[in-house]
Image (cartoon, helix red, strand yellow):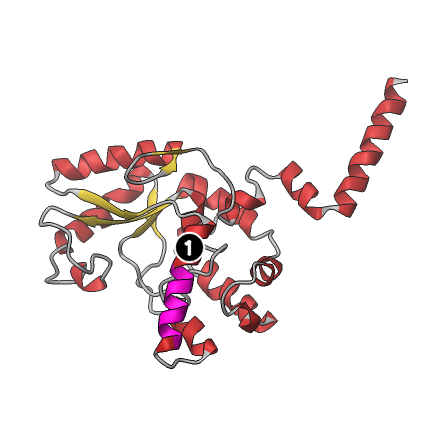
Amino acid sequence: MQRREFLKKSSLMGGLIILNPKFNYSIFNEFSEDELIGKGKPILLGDDFKLRNEAFLQFNMMRIAAKESGFNIHVISSYRSYTHQNGIWERKYKNYRNQGLSHEKTIAKIIEYSTIPGTSRHHWGTDLDIIDATKGIPSNPLSEVHFNEGGRMRKFKLWLDQNTENFGFYLVYTNDPNRKGFAYEPWHFTYKPIATRMLKEYKELDIKKILQGNKLMGSENFTDEFVEKYKRENILDINPALLV
């Protein structure tokens, strides 16, 4: 009787998996699809900024170490929900369209630095944008010029190069001239122990279906070719250490 009941349940489970691939995904993966695209409700820690538990604790340890070296790490951005990212997308989309750019050029301009909602690493609670606020916060804090030679955060940049990986944080968009996709971001770090697991599962999603199904501003221009290129260059052309 028990064997018959087991076979019955197994058959039912198989039917659900065939009929509903999303059910299949949720059974065998650590993170839900909604979590990966910014529509979930992950457990996060923090007030001024939010990260997943382990990432939050490691980041605070890194911040203490930085303070001991004379730096005041300030978080510009951390977790962002889908709604938050969509607000950024729509604001930039309207701005560039009002400047006279075509839909295609508008999208190309936005994705130099900003992600399409549903594809941002900031949805995961593992990524954050940081600066040194020892000398105050400049009006344009996320600018490469501050981190370059002679910039106000150059010493901080050198400290980051030497120390972040000791706490599990890795630069995402490196200054590799052969890298495509998003521009170099010396301020954007991810907590590798969790982020690599999330990226592995994210790659299993049907990105094209998700992007076109969300009816985003300009999504009618998300052709098969565009989505494949975006996935290859913007999502996956990152620091090789994060692709394991």
In the image, what residue occupies the spot 84% across and 35% down?
11
Residue 1 position (above or below residue 118)? above
Query: In x, y percent, where is residue 94?
Result: 39, 70
Residue pictured at 35% horizontal, 58% vertical: 173
Q: In what element is the residue under mark 1?
A: helix
Is residue 98 in sight in this rendering?
Answer: yes
Residue 144's place in the image compared with 100, above or below, is above
54 in the magenta segment: no
Residue at the spot 57% in from the left edge and 73% down from the top edge: 225
Amino acid residing under circle 1: Gln
* Residue at image mark 1: 85
- Residue 164 lies, in percent from the top left, at 27, 43
| Relative to 134, 238 lies left or right | right
Query: Image point 26% across, 34% down: which residue?
Result: 60
Quarter of the figure that contains the N terminus:
top right
Residues in magenta, as a range: 88-97
Residue 4 position by quadrant: top right
Query: In the image, is 199 to the left or to the right of 48?
Result: right
How many numbered circles are shown?
A: 1
- In this view, the residue in front, 83 or 212, is 83
Crowding at mark 1 (Cα within 10 Å: few <14, some 14-19, many 20+): many
Please say whether residue 91 is one of the residues in the magenta stretch. yes
Q: Is residue 158 left or right of residue 185?
A: left
